[in-house]
Amino acid sequence: ADYLDNGNNKMAIQQADKLLKKHKDLHCAKVLKAIGLQRTGKQDEAYALAQEVAALEPTDDNSLQALTILYREMHRPELVTKLYEAAVKKVPNSEEYHSHLFMAYARVGEYKKMQQAGMALYKIVPKNPYYFWSVMSLIMQSISAQDENLSKTMFLPLAERMVEKMVKEDKIEAEAEVELYYMILERLEKYKEALDVVRGKLGEKLTSELQSRENKCMAMYKKLHRWPECNALARRLLLKNSDDWQFYITYFDSVFQLIDESWTPPAEEEHSLEGEVHCSVEQAVNFIEERITEESKSSRPLRGPYLAKLELIRRLRHRGCNDEYKLGDPEELMFQYFKKFGDKPCCFTDLKVFVDLLPPSQYTKFIRQLLDVIPLAAAAENEVALPGDIKALQQHLCVVQLSRLLGLYHAMEKKQKLAVVRELMLRYRHGLEFGKSCLKTELQFSDYYCLLAVHLLLDLWLEGEEAAVWQCLTLLEEGLSHSPSNAQFKLLLIRIYCRLGAFEPVSELYSSLDAKHIQHDTIGYLLTRYAGSLGHYAAASQSCNFALRFFHSNQKDTSEYIIQAYKYGAFEKIPEFIAFRNRLNSSLHFAQVRTERMLLDLLLEANISTSLEESIKSMSLSPEEDDIPWKDLRDNRDLTVLFSWDPKDRDISEEHRKLSLEEETLWLRIRSLTLRLVSGLPTLGHTIQPKNSEKTAENGVSSKIDTIRALLQQLEAAVDSGKKFLEQKIQYPVLGPPPTRMAGFFSNGSCQCQTSLFYLVSDIYELDTNGLEDSAEIQERIGNSFKSLVERLTDLFNKCKGDLIEVRDGTLKTHPNLLENLVFFVETISIALWVSSYCDSVLRPFKSNLQKKKKKKKESSVAMPPVFTHFLDYVTELQTLTSNVIDHIKGLEIILTALKLEELSLKDTLLLQEEKKFTKTVQGKVQSSYHHSVQEIGELLKKRLDTIKKLKI
């Protein structure tokens, strides 16, 4: 066992063998040997050995635990349940084995069996937790039941009765048990009963979370629409803590609900269960004013009361009562707020919500008013006035962010914008002085200046200013050198490099972000969208693996979380874990990465290092199966991960999100159908009966071609939907979701090529079933298909011609679309070759039969059917075309190597010396990335050329 722990698996196997020579039946040694075998890649031997031991139904702890470890490493948790089922039968009173059995069921989600195992445990050892394990398993059955009705009429009522029994016998001990009772009542929509539980004696046990009882009461009052109670409770809690924002929201919601219902308090008795109720705007106004007066006496400044006042103004305006309540002018209130909290980074995000209250005509005046109160000092008369300390810097930064949000920068001319960029960069570099003592992992105080400058340059780039984008990269690289942990710099660099078609610097940036866990799903799209499409095949494989490793381990990890939650009685977390697992399983990104990864593997390996058939088998792909949950696809992308200070009309909207999801799903459908069609090619192999026999339908191949034809129709439909979608000509914001590769796929002709290749498969199949006699029509059709395919592929190649990077007026311009077209060309030619090798497998037997006939008849002139010459010409033309593309790529490599970037007259004299250094780095990175893309594409095409040479019949 020590050897296994240290990772020395071979020694472990040797030691186990020694032991087994002396003691032939030592179960535990056998299992440890099996673990060693599993870890050295001999899965089959390990499994056989483990099953030998398991068949003996061991009951010793060591063997059971070792087998559990082994099965877990094999990803076969269902075998653990069988193991403990046998052990429990032999040792029926073991608390330990029963609880192991319960946890084994939890790993595989067998809720019904968990319920039974929990009760069996409770009978042996009447401990409360075991009883409630069983109750929780009932709730789990109700959650996983497809039939809503069943869960409300059977599982939940049963769970409720089980808890009530414990309540009546006064056996409730722990907080978790009360939580569970509350959870059942809430799911049964018995809100009144749930409220009574929380307010009653049982509720006293709810102590672990701050305000746990109050929050639960509030939730129930809301469900029951008991607004007086909502209001009184929120009021009471705000008196205790006037900085708790959620209670302000509830307070306002309830006040206006009560006003709309014209509720009046009863004359004699209490207003409500929770005490005094406010039910008029006057009371609300006074209440907020009192909170502000109270705040002025508090030892530390609180933001809540001031923001609550702005929130109240906003709600009153929304209801059409503008200024009857004399709450003050929003502009003045925001100004006062800035004076009080302007030096806090949160000041901008606080005010951002309320800028709608300002009339646009006041924007410039408002910003000037704020600038006037910031202590800035200029060294000389016409120099920029700079802050003297961090407080002043934060205040100034807040104003700059507000200026961007109010659209003041967007309205400027190009010259003004460039002047602002200069000023912001000056302020950025000046601000670095305040952060000299910052650790590497801390951000510099002035980082946002640099980001805002880049945002302005991005505006200019979109308006057609080509040099601006290089300056963006320059400034970001400079920023990153001072603040190496700034994720915003890295994310923006990733987006811009990708837009320019340079993937190489991106992999390094992404890995330095050190994305953790769920982030592989939320921001992984930044990487996987561009990896394959820019020709960095090796990096693309790696980035897909990152993501897939997370998704696959999530399955295993979630079971572990659930088990921990049972052990510690954190029952309310269990449904959350299950929902989390479902959310990841139906993730759009997961489905995309799975599909693209398989297409990529086929592209790099099929018919190169292994045959197409073997590759498809190793991925256990089949054309009939579709493992994507189309109906439940979840878009978990975080589309606002990049900071943006744009006004609402330029920012990413709900509409953009909806459209992006629709586009991603359409593209995924096309890709997934392409993959399934390719996976169908090997299934059409040679098992064909004579034409007139009855057996064709039975032996399954004819149904295989039907599958392929059906998929082809689906592909046509998906392509039509895709084209319709693109007719809308949607433009996402520059920092919004990146568009898919669909537009390029249609416009460069890859789509038509790939579809006609699959139609060709159908024709060849028909030729195969009909034989060569009297099939002149099919042969001609195939011949024409070959001709038009070569034309289409040549067109596609023509769309790849041109310089990838050119120097125009002293500035670099990249052409990423040419690179994407080249990548599509490689993919399309690969599909063409897989289809050709299917043609080859059909035509070869025909040819050898003809040659046999020739020998028999001893005639020299058995006419060769035309399909053979068609195929030979086609293959020869494919070979010529591929050689031409390879030569073109060599040419591109030479041009890229010869491109002397140093000679670019960086005629923008605005660049300072240190900026020139970064500009050089940036352009070098882009050049090297293109160079590598072209190399990888060239290498792959050479391998494909070798496979063409084998196709001569």
Image (cartoon, grey):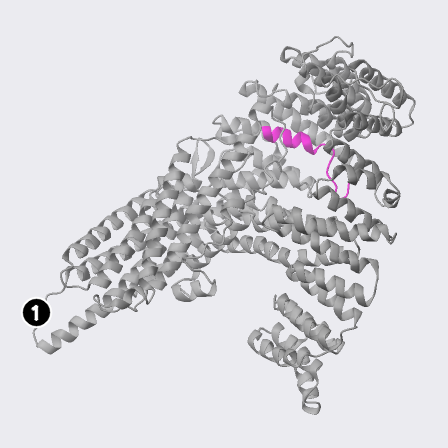
Q: Which residues are magenta?
A: 438-455
Residue at numbered disc 1: 861
Viewer-proximal residue, 293 or 474? 293
Number of marks: 1
CA neighbours of label 1 inside 10 A, class few (<14), some (14 to 19), many (20+): few
Q: Is residue 884 above or below residue 946?
A: above
Residue lying farthest to the bottom in this orientation: 22
Task: Classify residue 656 as left or right of residue 667.
Answer: right
Q: Quadrant of the N terminus?
A: bottom right
**Relative horizontal placement of residue 828, taking residue 862 as reference (left or right):** right
Where does the image place residue 327, in percent across and percent down from the top left?
A: 78, 12
Instruction: Say whether residue 214 is left or right of residue 879.
Output: right
Towards the viewer: 176 or 765: 176
Q: Position of residue 318 (x, y in %)?
A: 67, 16
Residue type (three-letter) at the residue carrying disc 1: Ser
Q: Is residue 454 magenta?
A: yes
